[in-house]
Image (cartoon, coloured by chain):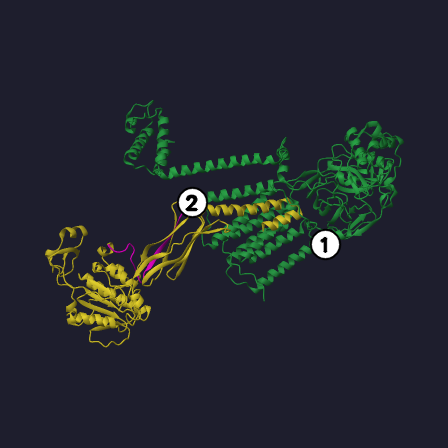
C-alpha cells in the first residue's frame, strides 16, 4: 500500500501568492535588519519575485522533467553552498542556515503550483523569521512578526475566497476590526500568559562555524575589561587587584536565555600578592558540540534546564561565558577546550556576530537545600589551592572568625554570615585608588578604605572562607546584564563585567555566592516568572504587578470576591451597552428614512439662525417670522428647502431619504 | 500549527515564537467570532429574464397575451437568466457562497462582500428543456474570511420556473377540406353577448371595431362575442410517450393546435388518460394550456390504462372532458383515447389527430404524422 497525501488544489489566487511572497520578503527583511546579511537575501528576493510570476503563469501546466531536474540541481547547489559556507566559511556569511532557507524558497518559487506548495514556501519563510528572531534584541522585531502573521492571514483569506470562486474583497471595516482584535488579543495573551518553560531540545545552531585551530598554548584573558595583568594580547590568565580597567556602556554580548543568570568565564584558585591565577593548566579537547553524556550529571534536585544563545557584539577572549553547570553546548568552532575548572574555551577570539548556544542546569540552591550539606574538610579534586590562604593577614583571619562566630551551625549559614557582613559594612565603588605599595589588597580593602569593587569583595570572602576551612575560589565573568523577561533576553554591557565567589558544598558542588553590595547573595534558585506583564510592569515606575496579587492572596478564600465583583460589573456594563446599542438600532430601523437626520439638521439650522422654533409654531410660521439677524443668501434657500422637507415629512409622512438630507447638510456647512 | 510554534518557542526560549503562536490562535478565535457575526444571511433565487432562442414563440406573441402571462415566460430552447441573491439585512457582511443545481446544471457563486442592499449575481442557463425547472440542493454558506469556520444557512430549494413547450401556427398547413371546415374557429361577431376584445384580424366586420380601445392601444381592436355555436375543442395527448423527446413533440403539437384554436377565438380542453383535464374556466387561457403541457406527462397514467396505474389514476379525475370536437396527439395507440374519440364521433363531433413517430394506428380518423424535429 502506498502512502499518498491527498491531492492539493492548484493555487489560482494571485493575491494569495502575493501574500506568500510578502511573508518571505518580511522574513528576509528580518534577516537583513537583524543578521546584517545582504547579498543572498537581495538576490533571492528578486529571484523569488520572478519565480512567483512564472509559477502563477504556468500553474495549470504539467511539470516538465527538465525543469524538475534543473530545480533539483539548484537545490543541491544551495545545499553545497550551505555546507561550503558552514565548513569552510568560504562565503563569509553570518547565517548560513538562513541563507540556505532563503535560497530554498527562491528556487522552489519557480515550482509553486498547488496550495500545499505555497504553504511550504510560507513555512520556510517562518523558519527564516525564527532564525532572525534569535538575533533580534528589540521590540520593533514584533512588527515584523506581526506583518508575517498578517501575510499568513492574507494567504488564508485570499486562497479561501478564490476557492469559493469569489473576488478577493472583504468588508473593509469588519475585517480590519477583526484583524486588529486578533493582533491585540495575541499581544494580550503574550503579556499575560506565563510563558511555558519546556525542556530545551538542544543548543540552537545559528552561527557560522570557524575552523581556526588552537595555536600553541595561548590562553586568552578572561576579562580584559576589568583586569589587565601581563600581556594585553591575552596570553595570561590572571586577575590583578592592583588595577582596574575602564568599563563603558557598550554591549559586549546579547544573550537569549530562559532564565537570568551569571555568565561565568574563567575561575581562579590561587591568590598571591594581589594577583589571582589558575594553578591547574590541564585541559581536554572536545568537539564543537558537547553532548550531556560528556559533561557532569545534573545537580541534585535540579529545577530543570534552560537554553542560552549568546551573540558576541565585540571581540571577546575565546572563553565560553555561560550559566553553570552546563548540560550541553554548541559553539561553531573547530574544537573546544575544557580546562580543569570546567570552563570551555575556543581556539581564537570570539568575533562580533558569532553565536554559540548553551543548555544549562538550574540547580536548586535554596537555603533549606544548602543547609543540609555537611562541612567539608577536604579540598575538592584534591586541589590544595582551594584552601590556601596565602598571604592573608591574621587580622583578616580574626575578622572572619569574629563575623561567623554565631553562625557556625552549618556551612551555608556561615558563608551567608560572612557574605552579609561584607555586603552590609563595605561600600561598593568603582572609583578606587591604587593599593599602596607593599600593602596587601585584601587588608587594604578590609581595614583601610573599606570600599571596593567586585574583585575586592570576592577576594576578601574567598580568602576569609578559606581561613575558616571552607574551600572557595574566584569566579569571573559577567552579571546577568539588562534582562528583559518579556523577550527572554539580556543585553550584557562592559559595565556588567563581574567577579564573585564559588564555595564548595559537599552535596551541591561549587555554589556561586556574591558578596558585592547590590547583588543577590545567592544565584536564582528557580525559573523566573515568565510573565511578560511582570516585565512590562517594570517598565512603568512605581508599578508592581505583584502588589495587588499579594493583597488578594492575603484574603484567602475571600479573594474571589473582588474579581467576581469586577467581573459582574464588567458583564453588566457590557450588557447595558449591548442593550442600548440594540435599542438604538431598533429605533433607527423603525424610523422613516432620513427623519431623524432631517430633524437634527433642522435643529442645527435653528441654532445657527439664533432663534429656536417655539412649540406651537409651525415650520412655515417659523420661516416667515423675523429672525435674530439678516440671513445670508445661501441660508434663505436652505431654510425654505428645509421647511418644505419638514412640512412634507411631518404632515404628509414623506420624509426625505438620507442622501437628500446629506445634500442639505452640505449646503449648511 | 500554533501549538508547534509554541512548543518550539518553549524549547528554544525565543519569546517571539510565543507571540506568533498567540497571534495564530487569536486569528482562529477572531475568525470564529467573525463567522458567528456573519450568520443570518438570506439567499434567494429568481428568474430575472430570458433570452429567446431561435424560433421561440415569445417573439410572435402579442403584447396583450404577454401581459396576462407569467412575468418571465420561458420556452424550451430559451436561455434564462437566474438571479442569485444573498441578503444580509443587518449591514455589510461577507464572505458567503451559494451553490446548488438548477435543473441538471450545477451552479455556484460567491462573494467576499455583501453590501447592505444585498448582493446579486446573474447567471444564464440554457438552452432549456420543457418542464418544471427546480432549484435543488441549494445551500448558503457563510463563514470567516480565513475559511476556518463555516455556517450553513437554510436551503432555498424551490420550483424556479416552468419551461413551456414551443409552438407554432399550424393553420396554414394543408388539411382535408372537411376537417378544416369542421374545425374552423368562430369569428368575432357571431354571438350576442360581448365577453371581451381582441386584435383585429382580416375579415372582421368593421362594426365590431372597438374604437376607444383601438385608440388606446394604437391598433385595431374588435369586440368579441360569445360564439353560441362554438364547442370546446379537446386535445387528447398520449398518456405515456415512449421517450422524453416524443413527449416534447407531443406537447409542441398540442400547444400549436391549442394556439390555433385560441387565437381563432375558440376554447381548448387538454386531457391525457390518467391525468386531469384543464379546468373549464381556463379553456381560453393560452398560459394555462402551456403550463399543463409543460408538466405533461407528469400526471398521465402509464400505458395500459387504469388497471396498470390504478393508484395514480384514482387520485385525479381521469375521465375525458366534454368537448364537441377533438384532436389527438399520440405516439402509440391508446385505448382510452380511442374510446373518448369514439364517443365524440358518436355525438357528431369531428376528430383528427397527430401521430408522432412511426406507430401504426388502425383507425379511419384523419391523421398526420410528425417526426421529432421541430419546426415541422
Q: Are labels 2 and 1 on one chain?
A: no
Packing grade of label 1 (10 A; few <14, some 14-19, many >=20) is some
**Disc 2 target residue:** B92
Front in this rendered view, residue A3 or A445? A3
State the image coordinates of residue A351 (x, y, percent, origin top left). 73, 45
Q: Vertically, is B27 above or below A107?
A: above
| Rendered-image quadrant of the C terminus of chain A | top left
Q: Is residue B295 magenta?
A: no
Where, by quadrant of the figure, is residue A223 drawn? top right
Is A654 placed left or right of A166 in the picture?
left
Q: Vertically, is B72 above or below A552?
A: below
State the image coordinates of residue A85 (x, y, percent, origin top left). 69, 53
Which shade is chain B? Answer: yellow
**Disc 1 target residue:** A88
| Rendered-image quadrant of the N terminus of chain A | bottom right
Give, as a single range, the part of the protein colored magenta: B68-90
Front in this rendered view, residue B295 or A352? B295
Amino acid at each position: 500500500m502506498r502512502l499518498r497525501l491527498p491531492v492539493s488544489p492548484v493555487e489560482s489566487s494571485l493575491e494569495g501568492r502575493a501574500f506568500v511572497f510578502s511573508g518571505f520578503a518580511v522574513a528576509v527583511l528580518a534577516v537583513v535588519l537583524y543578521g546584517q546579511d545582504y547579498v543572498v537575501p537581495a538576490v533571492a528576493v528578486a529571484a523569488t519575485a520572478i519565480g512567483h510570476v512564472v509559477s502563477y503563469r504556468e500553474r495549470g501546466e504539467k511539470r516538465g522533467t527538465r525543469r524538475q531536474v534543473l530545480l533539483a540541481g539548484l537545490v543541491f547547489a544551495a545545499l553545497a553552498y550551505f555546507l561550503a559556507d558552514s565548513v569552510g566559511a568560504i562565503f563569509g556569511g553570518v547565517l548560513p542556515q538562513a541563507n540556505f532557507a532563503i535560497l530554498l524558497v527562491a528556487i522552489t518559487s519557480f515550482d509553486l503550483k498547488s496550495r500545499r506548495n505555497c504553504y511550504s514556501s510560507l513555512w520556510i519563510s517562518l523558519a527564516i523569521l525564527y532564525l532572525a528572531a534569535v538575533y533580534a534584541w528589540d521590540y520593533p522585531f514584533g512588527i515584523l512578526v506581526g506583518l508575517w502573521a498578517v501575510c499568513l492571514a492574507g494567504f488564508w483569506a485570499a486562497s479561501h475566497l478564490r476557492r469559493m470562486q469569489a473576488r478577493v474583497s472583504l468588508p473593509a471595516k469588519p475585517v480590519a476590526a477583526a484583524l486588529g482584535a486578533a493582533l491585540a488579543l495575541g499581544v494580550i495573551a503574550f503579556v499575560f500568559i506565563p510563558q511555558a518553560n519546556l525542556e530545551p531540545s538542544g543548543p540552537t545552531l545559528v552561527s557560522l562555524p570557524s575552523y581556526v585551530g588552537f595555536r600553541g598554548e595561548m590562553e586568552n584573558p578572561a576579562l580584559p575589561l576589568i583586569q589587565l595583568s601581563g600581556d594585553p594580547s591575552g596570553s595570561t590568565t590572571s586577575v590583578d587587584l592592583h588595577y582596574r580597567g575602564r568599563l563603558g556602556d557598550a554591549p559586549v554580548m546579547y544573550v537569549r536565555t530562559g532564565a537570568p543568570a551569571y555568565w561565568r568565564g574563567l575561575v581562579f584558585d590561587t591568590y598571591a600578592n594581589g594577583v589571582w591565577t589558575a594553578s591547574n593548566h590541564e585541559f581536554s579537547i572536545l568537539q564543537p558540540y558537547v553532548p550531556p553524556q560528556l559533561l557532569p550529571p545534573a545537580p541534585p534536585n535540579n529545577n530543570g534546564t534552560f537554553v542560552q544563545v549568546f551573540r558576541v557584539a565585540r571581540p571577546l577572549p575565546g572563553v565560553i561565558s555561560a550559566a553553570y553547570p552546563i548540560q550541553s553546548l554548541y559553539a561553531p568552532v573547530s574544537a573546544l577546550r575544557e580546562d580543569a575548572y570546567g570552563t570551555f574555551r575556543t581556539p581564537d577570539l570570539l568575533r562580533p556576530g558569532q553565536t554559540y548556544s548553551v543548555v544549562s542546569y538550574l540547580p536548586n540552591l535554596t537555603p533549606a537545600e544548602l543547609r543540609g550539606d555537611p562541612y567539608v574538610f577536604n579540598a575538592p579534586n584534591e586541589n590544595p589551592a582551594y584552601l590556601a590562604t596565602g598571604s592573608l593577614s591574621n587580622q583578616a583571619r580574626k575578622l572572619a572568625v569574629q563575623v561567623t562566630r554565631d553562625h557556625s551551625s552549618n556551612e551555608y549559614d556561615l558563608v551567608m554570615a560572612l557574605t552579609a557582613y561584607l555586603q552590609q559594612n563595605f561600600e561598593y565603588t568603582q572609583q578606587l585608588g591604587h593599593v599602596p605599595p607593599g600593602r596587601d589588597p585584601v587588608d587594604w580593602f578590609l581595614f583601610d578604605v573599606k570600599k571596593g569593587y567586585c574583585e575586592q569583595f570576592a577576594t576578601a570572602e574567598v580568602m576569609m572562607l578559606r581561613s575558616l576551612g571552607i574551600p572557595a575560589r574566584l569566579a569571573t565573568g559577567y552579571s546577568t546584564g539588562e534582562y528583559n523577561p518579556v523577550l527572554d533576553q539580556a543585553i550584557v554591557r562592559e559595565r556588567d563585567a563581574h567577579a564573585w565567589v564559588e564555595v564548595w558544598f559537599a552535596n551541591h558542588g561549587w555554589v556561586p555566592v556574591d558578596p558585592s553590595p547590590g547583588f543577590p547573595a545567592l544565584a536564582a534558585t528557580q525559573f523566573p516568572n515568565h510573565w511578560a506583564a511582570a516585565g512590562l510592569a517594570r517598565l512603568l515606575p512605581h508599578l508592581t504587578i505583584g502588589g495587588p496579587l499579594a493583597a488578594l492572596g492575603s484574603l484567602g478564600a475571600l479573594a474571589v470576591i473582588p474579581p467576581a465583583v469586577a467581573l459582574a460589573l464588567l458583564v453588566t456594563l457590557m450588557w447595558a451597552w449591548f442593550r442600548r446599542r440594540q435599542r438604538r438600532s431598533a429605533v433607527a430601523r423603525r424610523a422613516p428614512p432620513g427623519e431623524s437626520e432631517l430633524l437634527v439638521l433642522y435643529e442645527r439650522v435653528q441654532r445657527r439662525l439664533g432663534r429656536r422654533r417655539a412649540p406651537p409654531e409651525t415650520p412655515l410660521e417659523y420661516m416667515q417670522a423675523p429672525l435674530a439677524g439678516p440671513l445670508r443668501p445661501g441660508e434663505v434657500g436652505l431654510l425654505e428647502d428645509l421647511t418644505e422637507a419638514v412640512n412634507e415629512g411631518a404632515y404628509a409622512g414623506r420624509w426625505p431619504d438620507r442622501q437628500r438630507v446629506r445634500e442639505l447638510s452640505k449646503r449648511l456647512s | 500549527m500554533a501549538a508547534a510554534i509554541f512548543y518550539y518557542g518553549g524549547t528554544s526560549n525565543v519569546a517571539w515564537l510565543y507571540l506568533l503562536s498567540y497571534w495564530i490562535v487569536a486569528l482562529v478565535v477572531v475568525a470564529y467570532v467573525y463567522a458567528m457575526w456573519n450568520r443570518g444571511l438570506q439567499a434567494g433565487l429568481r428568474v430575472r429574464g430570458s433570452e429567446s432562442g431561435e424560433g421561440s414563440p415569445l417573439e410572435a406573441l402579442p403584447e396583450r397575451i404577454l401581459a396576462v402571462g407569467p412575468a418571465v415566460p420561458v420556452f424550451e430552447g430559451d436561455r434564462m437568466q437566474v438571479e442569485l441573491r444573498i441578503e444580509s439585512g443587518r449591514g455589510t457582511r461577507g464572505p458567503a457562497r451559494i451553490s446548488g443545481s438548477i435543473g441538471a446544471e450545477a451552479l455556484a457563486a460567491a462573494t467576499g462582500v455583501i453590501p447592505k442592499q444585498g448582493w446579486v449575481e446573474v447567471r444564464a442557463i440554457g438552452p432549456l428543456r420543457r418542464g418544471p425547472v427546480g432549484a435543488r440542493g441549494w445551500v448558503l454558506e457563510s463563514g470567516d474570511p480565513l475559511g476556518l469556520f463555516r455556517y450553513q444557512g437554510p436551503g432555498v430549494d424551490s420550483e424556479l420556473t416552468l419551461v413551456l413547450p414551443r409552438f407554432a401556427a399550424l393553420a396554414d398547413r394543408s388539411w382535408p377540406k372537411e376537417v378544416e371546415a369542421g374545425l374552423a374557429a368562430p369569428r368575432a361577431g357571431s354571438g350576442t353577448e360581448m365577453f371581451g376584445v381582441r386584435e383585429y384580424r382580416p375579415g372582421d366586420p368593421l362594426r365590431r371595431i372597438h374604437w376607444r380601445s383601438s385608440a388606446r392601444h394604437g391598433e385595431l381592436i374588435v369586440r368579441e362575442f360569445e360564439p353560441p355555436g362554438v364547442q370546446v375543442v379537446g386535445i387528447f395527448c398520449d398518456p405515456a410517450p415512449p421517450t422524453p423527446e416524443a413527449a416534447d413533440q407531443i406537447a409542441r403539437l398540442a400547444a400549436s393546435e391549442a394556439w390555433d384554436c385560441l387565437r381563432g377565438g375558440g376554447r381548448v380542453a387538454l386531457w391525457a388518460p390518467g391525468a386531469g383535464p384543464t379546468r373549464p374556466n381556463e379553456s381560453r387561457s393560452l398560459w394555462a394550456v402551456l403550463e399543463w403541457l409543460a408538466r405533461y406527462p407528469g400526471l398521465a397514467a402509464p400505458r395500459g390504462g387504469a388497471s396498470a396505474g390504478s393508484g395514480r389514476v384514482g387520485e385525479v379525475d381521469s375521465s375525458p372532458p366534454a368537448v364537441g370536437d377533438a384532436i389527438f396527439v399520440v405516439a402509440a395507440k391508446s385505448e382510452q383515447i380511442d374510446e373518448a374519440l369514439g364517443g365524440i364521433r358518436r355525438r357528431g363531433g369531428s376528430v383528427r389527430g397527430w401521430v408522432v413517430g412511426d406507430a401504426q394506428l388502425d383507425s379511419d380518423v384523419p391523421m398526420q404524422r410528425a417526426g421529432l424535429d421541430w419546426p415541422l
